[in-house]
């Protein structure tokens, strides 16, 4: 791939704009005791039962304690509750010690039961209902004990109880547009405003404000001027490179789990043919994309789960960049320079995603595939994908922790609206492998089963795996002690402090 990619000129223009605007902006105000975090998009809700966007999910994690969490290898671990499996379809959960809501009332097993009953209530239309649909009953048999019965064995079930717990008494009222009484490390400091979410840390009263700044250039300028203290993700490599050269700014990269892939329509059109999908897969130079477009701020993905996952593939078979193989496959199908294969590619109208699309368009053109790019606002784009109205598209899975993703995305029974098998992939062999892995007697057998699932995905190519995107953290000089993890949680804010005296904005 040439160094003069479509991103080169745009990068130069962007940096010139930054320099010009930074000269025109006046001096930053003296910093106060509020830690300000920049968001690229607003959280849709602070109700954990409906929090599917990344901003909402991460903020809900700060506001509400959950029964179960995950360790570094993505194994479920106790948070509010421990558990025992009394039978393959029968779990008993117990609260660990005393835990309280922010108003001082104790958390009881009935609060946990009520939270998850409400998720299962069709009237709530919770997007998490499908994953929990095999729950037959939730019964609080004592203030600290919850018994859960399932319709089928599920050894991974504890890992599904990661939604924040809400007070049972408040769930009896009408659905709220704002937050419920929380139980996490932060509480809401003011009425919920999606554009400006104000939180207060429970242990010491440190205020943390989350401000929505949709334009990435504006976010970069604000953090460079001290108007924002912290920005995590959502910036192009050119901007993060520019920020790394600014005084008082620290830029760090953390390996991430955001999995980006190409999806195909396996129900109709040319992409039904495996040879077309193989031709596309071998035409893409993923190394060049990561090196040039991402400036190495990503790592290649050869499966849905990161290698660190207990069910990940530690030494996957790498997808080769082989344009000659692509041309040969297309020739078998009757396509060639005089008669190229024409496909439509759908993506969002995010600038960086459109840039990736143009690079893919160029790489596919080199083997005889003419790609028409159609970019849309997020709602239109995602609506088309859910309906199956596409030939090729690019999307990312965020926050993958359980291997139930394989049932959700690849089982033939998971076609929308009951699941996320958007390409309508149907394979009896895949269904059987998924079900066998779910029934496996122990973790080693389950891991082996899910690795077999991933090998079959590499053969059938309902997805072409592209990369796992790094989490890029940009922070100002006032921020001390912030860290994040593979999932990009904001948990580090529980320990972060502001160095107010050491780093004051210097007047100009």
Image (cartoon, rainbow, N blue to C red):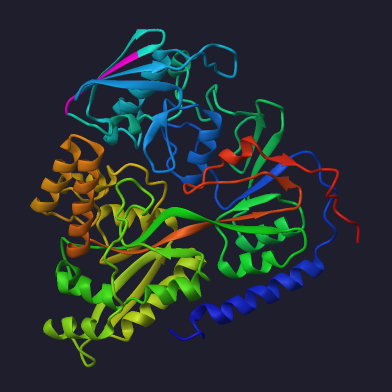
Q: Main secondary structure of the magenta part?
A: strand
The residue segment tinted magenta is: 146-152
Residue 136 is left or right of residue 333, and the answer is right
Q: Position of residue 335 (x, y in %)?
A: 17, 85
- Front residue (pair 215, 185): 185
Can residue 166 be seen here? The reply is yes
Q: Against 278, is 491 above or below?
A: above
Can residue 415 be seen here? The reply is no
Q: Residue at x 63, y 39 (%)?
A: 493
Q: Residue furthest top?
A: 142
Residue 440 is left or right of residue 161, and the answer is left
Q: Against 347, is 256 above or below?
A: above
Does the magenta-highlighted stretch encompass residue 198? no
The quarter of the image holding the C terminus is bottom right
- Front residue (pair 374, 370): 370
Q: Residue at x 67, y 44 (%)?
A: 481
Q: Residue at x 30, y 32 (%)?
A: 129
Q: Residue furthest bottom?
A: 338
Q: Position of residue 64 (x, y in %)?
A: 51, 28
């Amino acid at each position: 791939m040439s160094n003069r990619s479509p991103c080169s000129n745009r990068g130069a223009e962007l940096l010139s704009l930054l320099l010009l605007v930074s000269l025109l902006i006046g001096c930053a105000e003296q910093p106060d005791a509020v830690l300000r975090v920049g968001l690229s998009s607003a959280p849709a809700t602070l109700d954990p039962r409906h929090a599917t966007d990344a901003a909402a999910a991460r903020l809900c994690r700060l506001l509400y304690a959950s029964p179960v969490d995950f360790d570094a290898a993505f194994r479920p671990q106790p948070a509010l509750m421990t558990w025992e499996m009394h039978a393959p379809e029968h779990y008993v959960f117990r609260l660990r010690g005393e835990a309280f809501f922010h108003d001082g009332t104790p958390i009881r097993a009935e609060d946990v039961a009520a939270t998850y009953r409400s998720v299962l209530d069709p009237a709530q239309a919770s997007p998490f209902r499908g994953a929990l649909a095999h729950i037959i009953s939730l019964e609080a048999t004592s203030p600290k004990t919850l018994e859960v019965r399932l319709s089928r064995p599920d050894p991974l079930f504890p890992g599904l109880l990661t939604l924040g717990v809400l007070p049972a008494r408040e769930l009896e009222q009408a659905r709220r547009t704002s937050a419920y009484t929380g139980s996490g490390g932060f509480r809401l400091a003011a009425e919920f405003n999606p554009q400006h979410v104000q939180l207060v840390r429970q242990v010491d009263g440190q205020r943390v404000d989350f401000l929505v700044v949709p334009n990435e250039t504006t976010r970069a300028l604000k953090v460079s001027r001290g108007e924002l203290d912290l920005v995590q993700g959502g910036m192009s490599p050119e901007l993060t490179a520019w920020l790394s050269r600014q005084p008082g700014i620290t830029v760090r990269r953390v390996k991430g789990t955001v999995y980006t892939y190409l999806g195909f329509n396996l129900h109709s059109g040319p992409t039904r043919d495996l040879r077309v999908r193989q031709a596309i897969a071998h035409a893409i130079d993923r190394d060049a994309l990561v090196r040039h477009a991402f400036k190495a701020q990503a790592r290649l993905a050869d499966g849905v789960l990161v290698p660190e996952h207990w069910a990940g593939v530690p030494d996957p078979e790498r997808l080769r960049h082989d344009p000659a193989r692509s041309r040969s496959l297309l020739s078998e199908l009757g396509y060639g320079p005089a008669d190229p294969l024409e496909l439509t590619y759908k993506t969002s109208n995010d600038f960086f995603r459109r840039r990736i699309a143009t690079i893919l368009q160029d790489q596919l053109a080199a083997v005889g595939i003419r790609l028409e790019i159609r970019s849309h606002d997020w709602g239109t784009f995602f609506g088309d994908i859910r309906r199956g109205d596409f030939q090729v598209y690019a999307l990312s899975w965020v926050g993958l922790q359980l291997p139930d993703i394989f049932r959700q995305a690849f089982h033939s029974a998971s076609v929308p609206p009951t699941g996320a098998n958007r390409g309508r992939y149907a394979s009896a062999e895949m269904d059987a492998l998924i079900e066998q892995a779910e029934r496996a007697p122990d973790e080693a057998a389950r891991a082996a089963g899910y690795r077999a699932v991933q090998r079959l995905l590499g053969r059938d190519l309902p997805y072409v795996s592209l990369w796992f995107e790094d989490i890029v953290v940009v922070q100002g000089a006032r921020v001390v002690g912030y860290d994040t993890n593979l999932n990009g949680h904001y948990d580090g804010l529980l320990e972060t402090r502001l160095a107010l005296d050491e780093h004051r904005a210097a007047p100009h």
